[in-house]
Image (cartoon, helix red, strand yellow):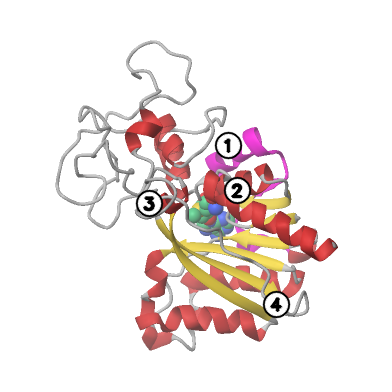
Amino acid sequence: MTVISLFSGAGGLDLGLVKAGNRVVWANDVDVSAVETYRKNLGRHIVCCDIKDVDLAAIPDADVVVGGFPCQGFSQANLKRAVDDERNKLYSFFKRTIEVKRPRFFIAENVKGILSLGGGTVVERIVSDFESVGYRVERRLVNMADYGVPQTRQRVIFVGQRCDVAGDFLFRFPEPGFGKGRRRPWRTIREALDRYPDPDTPNHVKNHIYSAYKLAYRNFTGHRPTDPNKPCPTILARGNGGGGVCAIPHYNGKRRLTIRESAAIQTFPDSFEFCGAMNACYRQIGNAVPVLFAEKLGRELRRIERVLGA
Ligand SMILES: C[S@@+](CC[C@H](N)C(=O)[O-])C[C@H]1O[C@@H](n2cnc3c(N)ncnc32)[C@H](O)[C@@H]1O
């Protein structure tokens, strides 16, 4: 299927969709380093600017619109005016794109916290917003570790289908195959990273460098020793509210993960090169949808395309 990608970042979601055989026709991000990374690895179809400055008429039509939208401006007290809240402009833009471009499907990724905002009313409001413009919407909370990603990253995936596309809701969320009681156990951080050389010795691995961040164990994400026999904790773009950066320690206890190791946890291939300053690279990676999971979403789009074409 053809895809419009909003808030594309370095392109984790887009790479997965492309690997599954879909084609991104237009992408956008405001972050200069992320756009440089995207261009180097995925192509020149990404436009670097604030999405609020984009004229929707300039975006080509596509089968699918994808993206994640921040939602800090929602609160139970202010539900009515939530969409006008300055902090929700990005959600509004996503919604407006769906209204104007009328894609057959949309996929939006968000943090787990969106489910509990306003005691669950925010998520209901978002779903009813999309229903009111002619879409059926389903959502699922997923743990990426259940899909073979070596990381316990939980995210909410919204999928919308335009009501006139088919009688049934066609999108089937990928089935989890990893974890207790399933085909295979969760993949561990050691399985994912043991193949990389020591970054302090000469090597040819791209982006295999790390920032000199002093490890301090303060018992919150990014500040705990890493168990080599478990999946990695969530790779975050910034601090997690506990203060400072979120630097996941290597299980050798000596340093934080390199940029390449963080990317491997997010299932980016080793050939994918990140651009920009070190903190910009870590941020792009922490922001991304794991490529492996995105590819599963992309395969489902391809399956639906075959069903609709038959
Ligand atoms: C969670 S990240 C998306 C990651 C991407 N889906 C991936 O898989 O790599 C959200 C992105 O939204 C971008 N963003 C935030 N505000 C924006 C704006 N006003 N206009 C365009 N992009 C914006 C950020 O720069 C960031 O790269």
Crowding at mark 4 (Cα within 10 Å: few <14, some 14-19, many 20+): few
**At x 36% / y 26%, what residue is drawn?**
194
| Between discs 3 and 2, the one toward the N terminus | 3
- Indicate the secondary structure of the residue bearing disc 1: helix
**Mark 4 and mark 2: Cα distance apart in space:** 23 Å
- Indicate the secondary structure of the residue bearing disc 3: loop
- Indicate the secondary structure of the residue bearing disc 4: loop
Q: Is residue 5 left or right of residue 122?
A: right
Q: Do the CB atoms of the residues marked 3 and 1 lie less than 8 Å apart?
A: no
Image quarter of the N terminus = bottom right
- Indicate the secondary structure of the residue bearing disc 2: helix
Q: Check residue 54 for magenta coloring.
A: yes
Q: Amino acid at mark 3?
A: Gly
Q: Which residue is mark 4?
A: 168
Crowding at mark 3 (Cα within 10 Å: few <14, some 14-19, many 20+): some
Q: Nearer the viewer, mark 3 or mark 1?
A: 3
Q: Nearer the viewer, mark 4 or mark 3?
A: 3
| Between discs 4 and 3, the one toward the N terminus | 4
Q: Which residue is mark 3?
A: 179
| Between discs 3 and 1, the one toward the N terminus | 1
Q: Which residues are magenta?
A: 30-55
| Between discs 4 and 2, the one toward the N terminus | 4
Q: Amino acid at mark 4?
A: Asp
**Mark 3 and mark 2: Cα distance apart in space:** 19 Å
| Between discs 1 and 4, the one toward the N terminus | 1
**Mark 3 and mark 1: Cα distance apart in space:** 33 Å
**Mark 1 and mark 2: Cα distance apart in space:** 19 Å
Crowding at mark 1 (Cα within 10 Å: few <14, some 14-19, many 20+): many
Q: Quadrant of residue 208?
A: top left
**At x 44% / y 30%, what residue is drawn?**
260
Q: Which residue is mark 1?
A: 37
Q: Which residue is mark 2?
A: 295
